C-alpha cells in the first residue's frame, strides 16, 4: 500500500489547529476530506507538527496511506482542487518509504515567529504577525534567548495541557533579529513542548522592552515553574517553516 | 484651518476601491467616518491614487482639512482606533502646508505587482498575489517591459472607463525580476491611466510564458488600440507602494 508524503502551506487563522476536533474545522480533517474526494477512501493523515489554532505553516509535512497508487503530481493537483476554498495548499506530493513517519521520523523542526514592531497596527499582515507597539531591542532579545539554547528542563515554558512525557528538550537554535519593521525569532529543535515558542516569544518581549534583563530569562528557565514565564504570545505570528528528516 | 497629511497601509480586498461609491465600503468613506468620530466634523479626504477594488496600499497618501488642531500623533492613534475593524492602518499623520495636495502635488507614484509563479495556489498570500501556475521567464518579461518605458500614447493599456484627459504618459520605470517563487513588477511614473499596470501585467505574462515575443509588446503599444492588449490581470497582486512629492 503506497505511502504518500505531503508538504503543506496553510493559513492557520480559520482552523482550530492541525488536529481534528469536534468543535471546528481542522487542517487534518480538511485534508482527509479532500483525500476521500480524490480516492473514495477514508484515511488518517499524520502531521509532523500539531500546530495550534491560528498557527500557520510554510512547510508542514504529513503522510497517509492509500490502497490505490496515483501519480504524485495528480495527488497534489487533485487535493488542491478539492481543498478549495480552505486556505491550505499542497506544495508537493511524493510516494515515500513505508517506514517514513511524518511525526516520528522528524530529525528537526524549524519555526519562525514574526513580531510587527511599530506604532500602527497591521492592515495587510493582520493575523500573520504579533503586533507589539512598544519599541523592542532585538539585540537584547537575542542575548536573552541564548540562555534558552541547549538541553534544559523547559517546565517554565510548557503549557499545562502539554502531553509530552518529559519537559527536558534540546533547543538547537533561538535567534532573534530585526528585519525592517519586524522582529523575527527563529527556533529549531528536534521537538518542542506545547506553547513553548509562544512562551519564549512572550518572555523575550519582556526583555526587548527592558522590563526584564537577559539574566531574568535565565532565572525563569531555572525556576522550572510555569508561573515564572512571561505572558504567552498570541498564535498569529507563528509559522512552522520546515521539517528535516 | 490645518491640513493633515496621512500615510496609509490597507488591504484592498474588502473594499470597492479607494473612492466613495454607493455600492459598497470604500477606503475613503472608512477614513471620513473615522475622522468624524475623532472630530465631529464631516470632511472630504483626498487620496494620491484612486486604487481599484482589491488593490492594496503600503504607502497611500491622503489629505484633509479640520477646523480644530490636533497633535498629529493623536490623529494617527485615534484614527487607527476608530478604523477598526477595517483593514486600514494610518502609518503616519502630519500637519502640512495649506497648498499641499495629495493628488496634484504628487511628483511620482510607485507601484508593485506581485505574481506568485508556482504550480500550487497561495494559502497564506491569497488575495495578495496573482497566482500564475505556468512557469514565467522574468528576464524575457523585463526585456519586453523596456519597450513600454518612456513617453508614449498608452491607449492600448487604458481601460475604456479611464477619465484621464490624454492617453499620453511618461513611464519612468518598469522593472521585472524574480524573487524566489514570486515575480515582481515595479512601475514608476508621475501618473498612470486606469488599469494601466494591470494591463501591463497581463500583457507581460504573455511574454513570460512565451506566447508573445518582446517585440509583440512593442507592436501592441504602437497599435494604440485597446484590443491589442493582453488580458487585464486581477487586482490582487497590485500595491501602491509610495508617492513622491
Image (cartoon, coloured by chain):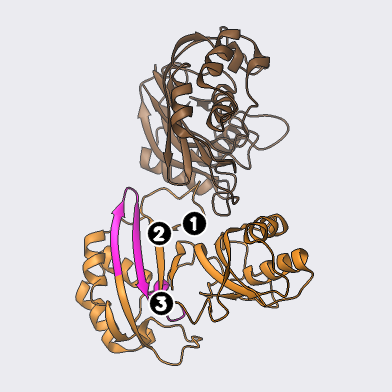
Chain colours: A orange, B brown
- Magenta-drawn stretch contains A180: yes
Residue at image position (58%, 14%) is B220
Between disc 3 and disc 1, the foreground one is 3
Label 3, label 1: how far apart the Cα atoms are? 27 Å
Marks 1 & 2, CB-CB < 8 Å contact: yes
- Tell me residue A132's x, y (percent): 38, 58
**Chain ID at mark 1:** A
Whether B83 is drawn above or below A214: the answer is above
Q: Which mark, residue A114?
A: 2
Label 1, label 2: how far apart the Cα atoms are? 8 Å
Residue at image position (53%, 69%) is A61
| First of labels 3, 1 by sequence position | 3
Instruction: Tell me the crowding category of disc 3: few under 14, some 14 to 19, or many 20 or more residues within 10 angstroms, Cα based.
Output: few
Q: Which mark, residue A107?
A: 3
Q: Is residue A8 left or right of residue A206?
A: right
- Tell me residue A103's x, y (percent): 51, 79
Which is nearer the eye, A217 or B153? B153
| First of labels 3, 2 by sequence position | 3
**Chain ID at mark 2:** A
Q: Which residues are magenta?
A: A174-199
Asked if residue A88 shows in the view, the reply is: yes
Whether A165 is drawn above or below A122: the answer is below
State the SS at label 3. Answer: loop
Q: Name the image quarter holding residue B149.
A: top left
Asked if residue B60 shows in the view, the reply is: no
The reply to whether label 1 and label 2 mark residues of one chain is yes
Image quadrant where one finds the N terminus of chain A: bottom right
Residue at image position (42%, 79%) is A192
Where does label 1 land, which residue? A128
Amino acid at each position: 500500500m503506497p505511502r504518500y508524503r505531503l508538504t503543506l502551506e496553510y493559513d492557520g487563522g480559520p482552523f482550530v489547529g492541525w488536529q481534528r476536533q469536534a468543535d471546528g474545522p481542522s487542517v487534518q480533517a480538511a485534508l482527509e476530506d479532500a483525500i476521500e474526494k480524490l480516492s473514495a477512501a477514508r484515511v488518517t493523515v499524520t502531521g509532523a507538527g500539531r500546530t495550534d489554532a491560528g498557527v500557520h505553516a510554510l512547510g508542514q509535512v504529513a503522510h497517509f496511506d492509500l490502497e490505490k497508487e496515483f501519480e504524485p503530481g495528480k495527488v497534489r493537483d487533485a487535493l488542491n482542487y478539492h481543498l478549495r476554498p480552505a486556505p491550505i495548499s499542497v506544495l508537493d506530493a511524493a510516494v515515500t518509504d513505508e517506514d517514513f513517519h511524518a511525526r516520528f521520523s522528524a530529525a528537526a523542526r524549524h519555526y519562525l515567529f514574526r513580531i510587527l514592531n511599530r506604532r500602527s497596527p497591521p492592515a495587510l499582515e493582520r493575523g500573520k504577525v504579533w503586533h507589539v507597539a512598544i519599541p523592542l531591542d532585538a539585540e537584547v532579545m537575542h542575548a536573552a534567548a541564548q540562555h534558552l539554547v541547549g538541553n534544559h528542563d523547559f517546565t517554565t515554558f510548557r503549557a499545562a495541557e502539554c502531553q509530552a512525557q518529559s519537559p527536558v528538550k534540546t533547543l538547537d537554535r533561538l535567534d532573534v533579529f530585526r528585519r525592517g519593521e519586524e522582529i523575527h525569532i527563529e527556533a529549531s529543535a528536534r521537538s518542542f513542548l506545547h506553547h513553548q515558542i509562544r512562551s519564549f516569544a512572550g518572555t523575550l518581549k519582556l526583555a526587548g522592552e527592558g522590563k526584564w534583563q537577559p539574566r531574568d530569562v535565565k532565572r525563569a528557565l531555572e525556576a522550572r515553574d510555569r508561573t515564572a514565564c512571561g505572558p504567552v504570545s498570541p498564535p498569529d505570528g507563528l509559522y512552522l517553516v520546515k521539517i528535516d528528516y
